[in-house]
Amino acid sequence: MRAYYEPISRSVNDDTTTAQYQSTDYAQGVWNPFEQHMAVATGLMARELEQFFPRNDLAIARLSLDVLGVIYQGETVVRTRFIRTGRTIELIESTLSTFDKNGTERVSIIMRAWRLAVSDTSAIAGTEDASCSPIDLPDWDGISVWDSGYINTLKAKVAHHRTGKSLVWFDTDIEMVADEPTSDFVHLIGMVDTANGIAMRTKDRAWISPSIDLQIHLYRIPRGRWLGLDTVQQIGESGVGLTSSVLYDEHGSFGRAEQILTVRHIGKP
């Protein structure tokens, strides 16, 4: 089975779960060959959150990720714990650590998730987002400019694409963890960070714009295989940009994602 991660070990100690993995070549990021892609790291952490003392009466409503440093390829450790327990609201934190070239463990990402009470709000449910679907859309190879292990695992379809704004759909056949089924939630959340590469404001590779965070707000839990990203990228005049996305599955919109960018000119690519 092809997967982004190989499991190593798992332990529980006083309400803290520690899980160890080995990233595979499929997890490789776009900025450096020795880094993991933020998308798959997000999916792995979402998987740990999903499995952490799950409750049918609570649903994940927000994922907030801060990138503290390089997400190195290789051994990856995810530690998950409660920040706040509650009857109708819980706050959970996961940290993802990797090991630098000297073998020193470093926290690469901190993710916090709010879980909120589930109730029947169908009587007043509704959204303002336009409907869209991946059915009958043409394949898109534009993402291939970001050649990497992760990007090369993706299937893509495009509704529209121009500088600064795109609507692209993604799917992948790669499991998040080897020999373990990937839920729809993990499958889809594990592709959200791809948004930062589909609506670039310039094709000049002398400019880079890596994100240092990822904020995902959900008003329902997504399901299915295809993730739609209706994305705009905006860049200010002082080195900061913002990638904003409406998130879709095959049943409609389900949330929003925002990514703040550090925009830099690095000279010749």
Image (cartoon, rainbow, N blue to C red):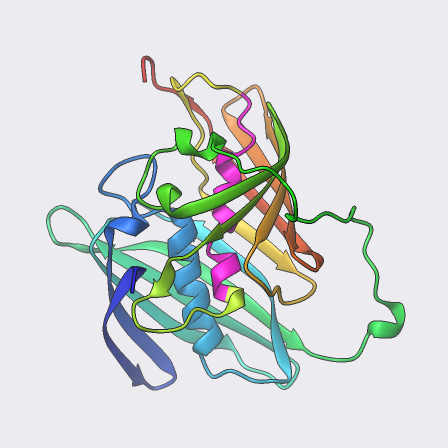
From the image, give the main secondary structure of the stretch colored magenta. Answer: helix
In reply to whether residue 108 is colored magenta, the answer given is no
Q: Along the horizontal axis of the image, is 167 left or right of 185?
A: right
Please identify the residue farthest to the right as the structure is shown.
123
Which residue is situated farthest in the top direction here?
268
Q: Which of these two is toward me, 203 or 179?
A: 179
The spot of residue 69 in percent (x, y) is 32, 45
Coordinates of residue 30 in the picture (x, y in percent): 34, 37
The quadrant where residue 232 appears: top right
95 relative to 121, above or below: above
Position of the N terminus, as image quadrant, is bottom left
Q: Position of residue 145 (x, y in %)?
A: 40, 28
**Residue depicted at x 64% and y 84%:** 57
At 48% across and 46% down in the image, what residue appears?
193
Q: Is residue 176 left or right of residue 141?
A: left
Q: Residue furthest front?
A: 136
> 169 or 246, which lies in front?
169
If the image is split into quadrants, where does the C terminus sit?
Answer: top left
Looking at this rendering, what residue extends furthest in the left direction?
102
Q: Is residue 167 above or below residue 218?
A: above
All told, the count of numbered labels is 0
Instruction: Give the left or right position of residue 119, taking residue 109 as reference.
Output: right
Residue at position x 61%, y 48% from top? 228
Question: Which residue is located at x 63 percent, y 41 percent?
Answer: 137
Side (left or right) of 247 relative to 63:
right
Which range of residues does the magenta coloring cover?
186-201
Q: Please state the horizontal and vertical placement of residue 182, each as a whole percent of the image.
A: 43, 69
